Image: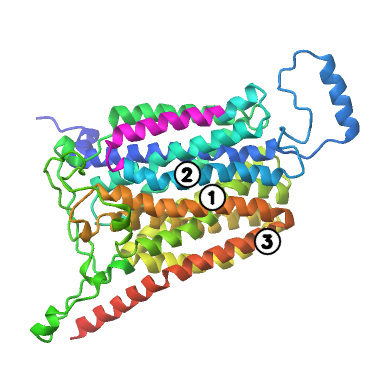
Amino acid sequence: MAQLPPGIRFITSFSRDQWYRAFIFSLTFLLYASFHLSRKPISIVKGELHKHCASQVELDSYKEYAAQIQPVKKPFNASQCGWEPFDKSNYKQLLGALDYSFLCAYAVGMYLSGLIGERLPIRYYLTGGMLASGLFTAMFGLGYFYNVHNLWFYIMAQIANGLVQTTGWPSVVTCIGNWFGKGRRGLIMGVWNSHTSVGNILGSLIAAYWVSTCWGLSFVVPGVVVAVMGVVCFLFLIEHPKDVSCSCTPSSSSKTFLNGASRCRIQMPPLNAKENGKSQDPELQHLLTDSENCSVSLSSTGEGRHGTSAISFLGALKIPGVVEFSLCLLFAKLVSYTFLFWLPLYITNVEHLDAKRAGDLSTLFDVGGIFGGILAGLISDRLEKRASTCGMMLLLAAPTLYMFSAVSKMGLEATVVMLLISGALVNGPYALITTAVSADLGTHKSLKGNARALSTVTAIIDGTGSVGAALGPLLAGLISPSGWNNVFYMLMVADACALLLLLRLIQKELQCHADHTLFKEH
């Protein structure tokens, strides 16, 4: 018998379950990357919506020339300071209003999205959201082609897009949580969460390609991409391993410390039966599950997939650690989204680059974010401490932001280095909380195997974070007229607040480590 070709041997070396998991990993990665791809254009186009004004003589000459030539290929805008109504002196506040419209709608919608998504098939829910998001993203760009200069048109497009994009995160996290167990979850989800940075990079490159010639296409093309990926989602997304008769992933090992909310799994022998009967710390009674058990019971009307009733909003808040990590994410996401929406404009003002080059350069922040998310997951798996890992990166992020504000004015080379470092430290905690921590808490032992609850828990954590995402760009728009240094001071304060909110969980992780060491000695 002839020897099998190397490629066939490679394919057959993996089991059917492993191939399905690799497929779901890649598909959900691409689906959410397309969401972020459609969010990035607004930050790139800001430099084109408001430009440095031409001199009055040049402006008068241009008006006379434009009046003689009919029709003109490019939509004529009466002011050469940019695109009306963003050509006014208060342009930063107007551009900030666009960011705030999207992010505020996203934050409000996220709390409802998890509850709705918990009760609907993920494939249909996510497909509908992606098709609608493609429509509203393209709608913003159509304002260029139809020469729309009404501020409310652009604000309403942003609000609608923000609402429908809330279908994405709870859906993909629930799906990936169903397919992957807790073993090496931090590393796996750290790699998977790089879809955020990959989407931002692709969105920046696509938007920058057309921003100086036809900025409408900077929105239309990403809108088409999201819609096409929505069709792909409908055709191929598999919500749960049981749908294709795959086995659930067994945990590779029992983790001693997963995060500060779950304390530790050390069980000291009771001194007497009376002490054993005493009520324990409620956080010791709600440890994370030791294995990924899959129930095969059929759901009934009004119940979750696994035959258990859907978790309530207040019930999800009672899970130890949800409140602390949610509030921490509020401030972490405030910093991250301020960079997402304002970094290209900052680079334009400081480095005096055009919109395209500033957009290309801003992608380095997301490149750093990829490495930061993977590093955070790897460290948290190795140390088995989620909160401590986040706290360590937040502690380093604040002085790094101060260095960035000072060094970025010294030249392009220094800016490149600081963009990479800042991206890693800012996005590391954000990535870890929204993925591995959310999945840990969403599969908490107190949920008794209700996998559908993961959607609600994820929505609460990310929804609270989205409040910060809405506030960050808004505050940047209000503060930046007084100087960019003040914006960086605001970001450093936000990082410090995020760290303070995790101190209780960090202290518990350290205490758990001390108890574990003491137990081993005895």
1 or 3: tag closer to the N-terminus: 1
Q: Which residue lies furthest to the top in this view?
A: 70
Three-letter residue code for mark 2:
Tyr
Q: Position of residue 255 (x, y in %)?
A: 23, 65
Q: Is residue 422 magenta?
A: no
User: Residue at label 3?
Assistant: 486
Three-letter residue code for mark 3:
Asn
What is the CA distance from the residue labelled 3 to the residue labelled 2?
26 Å
Q: Along the line of sight, which residue is nearer the eye, 336 or 408?
A: 336
User: Residue at label 2?
Assistant: 106
User: Residue at label 1?
Assistant: 470
Where on the picture, by quarter, is residue 245? top left
Q: Residues within 10 Å of mark 2 (few under 14, many from 20)?
A: many
2 or 1: tag closer to the N-terminus: 2
Q: Is residue 241 left or right of residue 55?
A: left
3 or 2: tag closer to the N-terminus: 2
